[in-house]
Image (cartoon, rainbow, N blue to C red):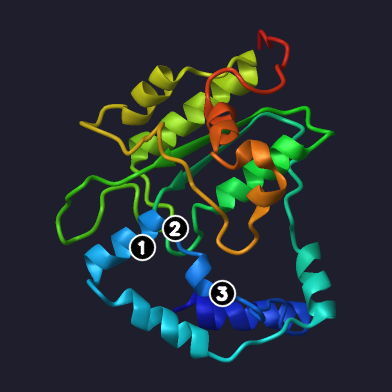
Amino acid sequence: MAYATIARYDLELRVLGNPSSNTGARYDQRISVKEKQEMDFIDPGGLPGHLAELARAPRAAADSAARKRADLLGDPTGALRVPTLTMHPGYDGTAIVQNETVFANRTLRSTGRTGDLMQISTTPLARYPGSGAPYGAGHCNFTTDERVGAMTNLNRLVRTGARPSLADVAILMRGTGKSSGFDPLFVPGHWPAERELDSFPALRDFSALRRLSGPTTGPRRPRNPS
């Protein structure tokens, strides 16, 4: 709730108005089949009622000047200049993992890109204690070994220009722990609202996203002996 209240209030003060809009929003079309199955597992039969409530909810239009000011606060273009690595829990309710799809699409479309992008996703155990998932679910919920492993992978990518293999990533992400949430098969899926994939057919089945996250895609930097 802090992001929906305090952080939202702070944002509107900074951009002098409401920068977001949900006019014309069809929330029922923003949920994937997998997400519907997961919601039905958690709350059997509850989803139709929640969607009906959202459909009846009032809509708010953005203030165009506030929206332009919000864009100036930061809007990634994907025109990477240096090797870049991102790591995201597969189930983050605060910063949704589909942000990675948007970033990957923009990176693939960028004509001025000179840096490589590698994206790592983590997912939780199928079952875990009531105290919460040890990794893979929750906002920036990573183990210490996962954080160190990600930094080590990035360091190697920057210094050598060679992307680590998926096996190397898995070993480094596990570190000294018994397991890690590194999931090479996880794909973030559609951004709920923008439908960017409709204008980029090569990504409709997410195969290009898998190549982007694989061991061989992207510009190469010369080897740096230092």
Task: Report which residue position mark 1 lands on.
Answer: 36
Task: Report which residue position mark 2 lands on.
Answer: 32
State the quadrant of the N terminus: bottom left
**Whether label 1 touches label 2, CB < 8 Å:** yes
Measured from the top left, where is residue 3 in percent x and y?
51, 74
Q: Could you tell me how far apart the alpha carbons at marks 1 and 3 are, in whole angstroms?
A: 15 Å
Q: Secondary structure at mark 2?
A: loop
Q: Secondary structure at mark 3?
A: loop
Q: Nearer the viewer, residue 36 or 213?
A: 36
Are there few (<14), some (14-19), or many (20+) residues within 10 Å of tag 2?
few
Measured from the top left, where is residue 64 in percent x and y?
82, 79
**What amino acid does circle 3 point to?**
Arg
Rendered view: 216 above or below 13: above
**What amino acid does circle 1 point to?**
Lys
Q: Residue at x 48, y 71 (%)?
A: 28
Q: Nearer the viewer, residue 175 or 139?
A: 139
Q: Residue at x 35, y 47 (%)?
A: 136
Picture quarter containing residue 84? top right
Q: Could you tell me how far apart the alpha carbons at marks 3 and 2 are, in whole angstroms?
A: 13 Å
**What amino acid does circle 2 point to?**
Ser
Task: Report which residue position mark 3 lands on.
Answer: 26
Are there few (<14), some (14-19), or many (20+) residues within 10 Å of tag 3?
few
Measured from the top left, where is residue 67 in percent x and y?
78, 74
Q: Residue at x 79, y 38 (%)?
A: 110
Of the image marks 3 and 2, the number of the one nearer the N terminus: 3
Q: Nearer the viewer, residue 188 or 114?
A: 188
